[in-house]
Image (spheres, rainbow, N blue to C red):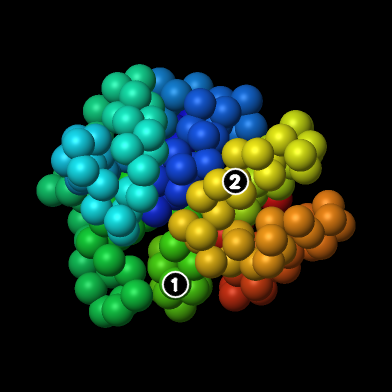
Amino acid sequence: MYLFIDVDAICKLAHWQLLDKLPTLLGVPTSNCITLSSVQYRAQRCVSKVDGKLFRTVEAAQAVLTAVQSMRAPLDATAFELTVFEDASNIDPGEAVLFAATMANPGSRLLTGDKRALRAVAELAKVRSELVGRVVMVEHVLLAALDAYGLDWLRTHVCPQVAVDKTISICMGSRCDAPEPAVRGGFESYLNEIRGACDPTILIN
């Protein structure tokens, strides 16, 4: 099984020092993970000077470079038919390539942090029908980490750079001190929002 990872997700997980935990948390070896070539180029530039947008720390940029070196070759955007996404204003070209790659590889999954793109996919009947039960959100990864390692461990990893994701910041509490039921409930509430966008859901169980 391949796991396609979008730029948003790989960068956030890098800030939270979670990239090397993906094989344990999602059951997919790094050698079966695939991302876009653009993230590697951005990371290379940010190793010497962060851009303050995609990368806020040099350590996160280096973590992405290290992870990409162990992954399969980055995706070639020209290899996929993308016309089905032309009228979807909230799906950028990179996300379109990842959705198309997932559709073209039965049994594969997509890890994304882009909720706008997922809401847009819910409006594309052909796309959503091929992605049923195959999309993993960043919140899934954090829930898996919470289950595996506990709340204190999760805080240690996420809180120093929690601001890279507004919704995760809300879930973790104003001072990153929310109790476990609130954290867990927050993650689930955002997952349920996307689950409810279409039936059957595109999210994994």
For label 1, the SS is helix
Q: Is residue 67 visible?
A: yes
Q: Is residue 136 visible?
A: no
Q: Quadrant of residue 171?
A: bottom right
- Residue of label 1: 116
Q: Amino acid at mark 1?
A: Arg
Q: Of 179 and 89, which appears nearest the observer?
A: 179
The spot of residue 95 in percent (x, y) is: 32, 58
Which residue is depicted at the point 13% across and 48% down? 78
Find the distance from the CA under tag 2 to the CA under tag 1.
Answer: 22 Å
Say if 54 sits above or below 18 in the image: below
Which residue is depicted at the point 46% across and 78% down? 123
Say if 61 sits above or below 186 in the image: above
Which residue is depicted at the point 20% across and 36% down? 48
Does residue 170 appear left or right of residue 84 in this picture?
right
The spot of residue 105 in percent (x, y) is: 39, 40
- Residue of label 2: 158
Q: Of 189 and 127, which appears nearest the observer?
A: 189
The spot of residue 81 in percent (x, y) is: 21, 56
- Labels 2 and 1 touching (C-beta < 8 A): no
Q: Of 200 and 28, which appears nearest the observer?
A: 28
Q: Of 54 and 192, which appears nearest the observer?
A: 54
Give the residue furthest to the front. 175
Q: Amino acid at mark 2?
A: Val
